[in-house]
Image (cartoon, rainbow, N blue to C red):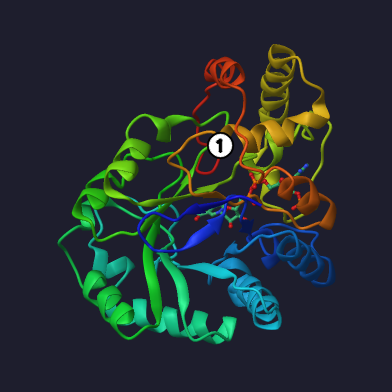
Amino acid sequence: MNYRKLGKTGLEVSEVGYGAWGIGQDAWVGATDDESLRALNRAIDLGLNFIDTALAYGEGHSERLVGQVVRERSETVYVATKIPPRNRIWPAPAGLHPDEVFPGDYVRECTERSLDNLGLETIDVQQFHVWQDEWIGEGGWLEAIEELKREGRIRAFGVSINDHQPENALRLIETGVVDTVQVIYNIFDQSPEDALFPACQRQGVGVIVRVPFDEGSLTGNITPETTFKEGDFRNDYFGGERKREVHERVESIISDLGISRDELPEVALRYVLSHPAVSTVIPGMRSVKNVERNMAVGDGRGLPEEQVEKLKAHRWVRDFYSA
Ligand SMILES: NC(=O)c1ccc[n+]([C@@H]2O[C@H](COP(=O)([O-])OP(=O)(O)OC[C@H]3O[C@@H](n4cnc5c(N)ncnc54)[C@H](OP(=O)(O)O)[C@@H]3O)[C@@H](O)[C@H]2O)c1
């Protein structure tokens, strides 16, 4: 496994990390705790040392599973978690005062709850689960974060940028108070390359890439006939004509690159890791099989330049979360 610097945090993280949303068993239906624990352990066996979870994932369930594994293992594993917006609105709309979303006492209370769920003394990266750049200089959130850092309850502070709004953290990055950002970046949504990544590189801000497979379409496994279990959020995400739409786009990627369908997940991860601003990519992977396939990609090799160039033509930014 290849390791990269997480910005200026001092942490060296595996370039393939673990996205722990799916194991929370709320929005994603179908995980079993036994398999999730096996998947997490297998990932650590293979050199993974960075896990991204959130207080909201299964209302603490994901954090409890992650904490169990991290406490049991002798290896150092860094944990990033997130504070949900107090108003429970994802993504954060414009026009709200930050004290409605992340008041200082709430930031502290959520951090204590996450530490309890994880059973750990310190959270390596505490993140806001949504962000609006207009909150800079307003409200009590920054004082709370600085206090938690001084007390050693959190090591680093980051924000998870609103879906498909990579430029909605540029001002925050320039202030220097943020250590990491988490952003959607994949073959379809290449927009972080425009301004976010250069800003992160200038300021030494770590980049955690989420949703590298576009919730599954970039694995090549979504066809017009695919069905999801009742209650699974992908019934909405891939609702209406979207399965057909993504399938057509994926077919065109496969034929343009001259690869087999089986190679697509690897290409999708390598595309992300080819950008030097990226510190770690955190695919969701609830099965041991997917863990093994994805961990093999963390060998420090990017995609050949000509494939990266070809993939530029497949940029397709849209928002399936809120539409
Ligand atoms: N607002 C936010 O802050 C936010 C929002 C979304 C996600 N996230 C974070 O980002 C992480 C990743 O995003 P995601 O999990 O939503 O989506 P994703 O990583 O784009 O896709 C996950 C899907 O890909 C499948 N998969 C993984 N590796 C595969 C492989 N090698 N071959 C075939 N299929 C494969 C998974 O299957 P199985 O799981 O069944 O193995 C799952 O169905 C989350 O877990 C979470 O930590 C954060």
Q: Position of residue 23 (x, y in %)?
A: 71, 64
Q: Name the side, left or right, on which 5 lies relative to 213.
A: left
Within 8 Å of ligand 1, the CB of disc 1? no
- The reply to whether residue 25 is in sight is no
Q: Residue furthest left?
A: 137
Q: Secondary structure at mark 1?
A: helix
Residue 267: percent from left, percent from top: 68, 31
> Residue 145, percent across and down?
30, 74
* Nearer the observer, 193 or 100: 193
The residue tagged 1 is 272
Please provide percent x and percent y for residue 201: 33, 42
Which residue lies at the image location 58% right of the left edge and 50% below the top edge?
Answer: 15
The amino acid beneath tag 1 is Val
Hey, which quadrant is residue 116 in on the image?
Answer: bottom right
24 shown above or below 183:
below
Identify whether 301 is placed above or below 9. Answer: above
Decide if residue 107 is on the left or right side of residue 271: left
Q: Residue at x 35, y 58 (%)?
A: 8
Crowd rating for badge 1 (residues with CA inside 10 Å; few <14, some 14–19, many 20+):
many
Vertical arrangement, residue 167 with respect to residue 120, above or below: above
Which corner quadrant of the image does residue 191 belong to? top left
Q: Nearer the viewer, residue 23 or 209?
A: 209
In the rendered image, which quarter is residue 136 located in?
bottom left
